Image (cartoon, rainbow, N blue to C red):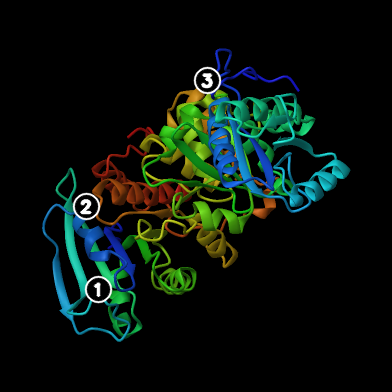
Amino acid sequence: MPRAGTGAVGGISASFCMNAPIRHFKVAVAGLDLLHATRLKLACSLLLAERMDVTLHPWNGQDADLLVVGGDASAAEATREAEALGVARLTIARSVQAATAGALPHGASVRDINQQLAVLLAATGTAEDDAASLAALPVSLLQALQSPAEGGLLLLQRGAVRFAVDAATRSVALPPGLSLAELVPLLDDQAWSSTPLDAATFQHQYGYLLPRRRSFEALYFSIARHRPSLLDAPAAGTPVRLQHWPDLEHSDVPAEWLLPIAQLHARRWTSSSLAAACRLPHDTVQSIFSAAIASGLVPHQENTVPSPPRSAGLRDSRFLGWVARRFGLDLQGGRA
Amino acid sequence: MNLPANKLVFVGGMGAGKTTAVRAISDVEPVSTEMPLSEDATADKVETTVALDYSSIELDDGELLHLYGVPGQRYLDFMWPMVCEGALGVIVLVSAASPDPVGSTLELLQEFSRIAPDASLAVGITRTDEHPHLMVTAVRDALFAAGFRLPVLRVDARSATQVTFLVRSLLSHRYAESS
């Protein structure tokens, strides 16, 4: 599989692709002495500069992209097992006279090992890696996760920014300092890397780092506010009604969105009629419609939303208008 | 004489943030009534509990919006009907630290929808900074399943901005439902 930067030396690459997602590899070790095991660890850590994240573990007879073997007795057995499984191997042994593909002499340097690892691991790439790379587009990813069959946690990282998408609870797990407004501008960036996680692993390794939960609803409304072009436009003339009041905080949407949201919560509207009723730009109402539909708050069956009749009527409408104005809300015009 | 609904009521259990929320949006320092501790007292509320908070907000034309904070404990339920007479809205505050946020909220919603059938209802979930994993949507969906379809928002009762957003949501909800 072609990849950028395979000619790296010591983790520095001239042709390095900044937008390539991080690829994850498992490298097994058998029969290495302490010196070479330490050099191997260093060589692996330097591969991060090549956007290759390597996890080292002792050979267990399975589950590895590459086996690095030394020259002792246990290495021979591991070599046979790896050969049977078709796992690529790198041998570091006294019996090797000169460096060749997949073999290094005893005393190989960190640089030697790093170069060999880069070449051998690059060759292990599969079509699955390509698919994983394509999946590192969070917006597309979120849309895909609306399907329950795609359930599971996905850890997304881009530089210092890290969050997780939890399809099971339809939420994102955020670090304490990251707001949705800060996250949204980065959503269609190509530099995200993604790592699937199970719930137990997430809780153990990332739960304390990503303690805050915000729903997909809040994220979609935040996208509608800051990057409406990322959402599909609703079909013209389609009446929409919200099944639930969206999960929103004051920082997610401007105050003038509350009245159209309340109207959509109360009854079905087309975007043009709602824009006229709330005296808001049609584009703004279209954005609200897009968020409502994307977040799954618009029921397919109208009769799934009960609407009990109210008895208060408009008896307090004038007073309500005064109260609303006091709280910075113009109920007649929808503005705040 | 048919007076306009001119009260906004915050109700909730101990430590839910009623006093703080009323104070956050008041024009004047609220008047509070102290009562003995209930047996539900939590560790950080061991000295006194506030039985009732009252404050007001002056509107453009000189009219007053009366703000009340009333406890959700059953032994003080005698004051609920008095306070709720003429309420335009009742906001149930529930702490995310509550052992059963859905159950306690549902109990209050059922009571106050009966006591104040003309009032609009909303729910504010407080102390989510201490319990950030709580999902608002899970609480909302559970309330919906029990027959309550209303705004459910997280709110920091110490923040005037956030309490105002909650009140704005309630007012928008009331306006849309009644128009």
* Label 3 Cα crowd, 10 Å radius (few <14 / some 14-19 / many 20+): some
Q: Which is nearer the eye, A35 or A59?
A: A35
Residue carrying label 2: B25
3 or 2: mark nearer the eye: 3
Question: N-terminal of the two: label 2 or label 1?
Answer: 2
Q: Is residue A237 visible?
A: no
The three-letter amino acid code for the residue at tag 2 is: Ile
Which secondary structure lies at badge 2? Answer: helix
The part of the image, by quadrant, that contains residue B50 is: bottom left
Farthest-out residue, right: A84
Disc 1 sits on a residue from what chain? B
Residue carrying label 1: B44
The three-letter amino acid code for the residue at tag 1 is: Asp
The residue located at (46%, 57%) in the rendering is B133
- Tell me the CA gap for discs 2 and 1: 24 Å
Residue B95 locus on image (x, y percent): 37, 66
* Label 2 Cα crowd, 10 Å radius (few <14 / some 14-19 / many 20+): many
Q: Which is nearer the eye, A22 or A103?
A: A103
Q: Is residue B47 above or below residue A215?
A: below
Is the same chain shared between marks 3 and 2? no
Which quadrant of the rendered structure holds the N terminus of chain A? top right
Residue A36 locus on image (x, y percent): 59, 40
Disc 3 sits on a residue from what chain? A
Residue carrying label 3: A12
The part of the image, by quadrant, that contains residue B66 is: bottom left
Residue A18 locus on image (x, y percent): 54, 20
2 or 1: mark nearer the eye: 1
Which secondary structure lies at badge 1? Answer: loop
Q: Which is nearer the eye, B114 or A6?
A: A6
The residue located at (75%, 30%) in the rendering is A102
Residue B121 locus on image (x, y percent): 41, 60
Q: Answer left or right for B24 relative to B172.
A: left
